Amino acid sequence: MKNFLIFTTLLLIFSCEKDEIPIAPHVMGEIKTTQIDMGDDYSKQVFFNLEKNEVVSENLKTKWDIAFEASESGYNIILNSSKFSKVSEITNMNFLDNISVQNLDWQWENPNGINYGSAIGDYTNKNYFYVVDNGFNLNGINNGFKKFIIDSVNNNYYKIRYSNLDNTDEDSATIFKDNNKNFIYFSFQNKIVDIEPEINNWDLVFTQYTHLFNNPLFPPSYLVSGVLTNYINNVKVTLDTTTLFEEINYENINSLNFSDKQNEIGYNWKNWTGSEYTINTNYTYIIKSVSNRYFKLRFIDFYNSSGERGFPKFEFQEL
């Protein structure tokens, strides 16, 4: 009788337990193929959203000269490195002095992004002014020089003055910050220009930019064509050169080390042979997007159907 009661009690306990709810397997997205039109002269900057598989904006790379960090707590100023611009900080002269560009100490923009320093840097507590070599236009002709100074800066705006080196064409502008943008873009000719989409609406920008070499066999700086990321808004990337594209899945993510460098994708997914570009198809980039989703991406071409370069083609898949 005692054994019967024990058996009956155990039967009731186990029969009252809830059935286990099965966990559905993670389903990856479909593989998509996209081609970007940078122009065969690399004249365009093209902003792309991975989740939407959509170009959200594009502009001529020559449309802007410098850009101002747009958050309330941000004070960095960057150059348009797609024009091969460079800058010199002037600490021993007054802004209204006539300036010669001879023997100036030039700096190019840091391709890693402002988290790793920049040519101008954080402008708070500075009394210097700057001379900008404004790079080249689309015909390869130098755009000349400008100088500028920040008269005041706070959480809401920058106030600047700028002119030619001999003080002709002096002008001023107020650049208001906007928390919906990473940077406010500025042209010495047209003042504020609309370039970058809102911070949550893009992941990658296809563009030329200035790469800096640390190899004495190469020039210190060189204009390259590649991909930069929305790193300020937490887009991160890692590169896998050993695992097949098809074999990379969501379960790989936790073992990967992601980088916040804006040029982590960069330009070297392709190679110049001396006559044409070839693609490193074993390079797979795993990207944490602006919407906190994960994608894998690899390039498969750099030419369009007419054989024109400047049309990067890639396939990608949400993990």
Image: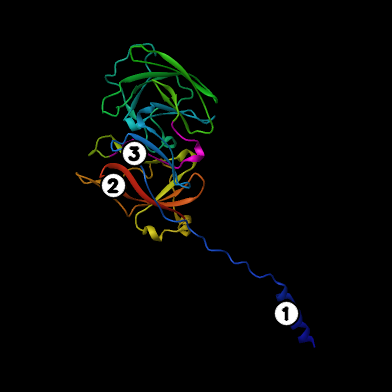
Amino acid under disc 1: Leu
Closer to us: 258 or 167 = 167
Amino acid under disc 2: Ser
User: Taking 55 as reference, is 137 left or right?
Assistant: left
14 vs 63: above or below: below
Q: Residue furthest left?
A: 274
Q: Secondary structure at mark 3?
A: loop
Closer to us: 115 or 303 = 303
Who comes first in sequence, dot 2 or dot 1?
1
Amino acid under disc 3: Met
Asked if disc 3 and disc 1 are in contact, CB closer than 8 Å, the reply is no
Scheme of image coloration:
rainbow
Question: Mark 2 highlights which residue?
Answer: 305
Task: Give the residues drawn in magenta, as a range.
Answer: 195-214
Q: Secondary structure at mark 1?
A: helix
Closer to us: 303 or 239 = 303
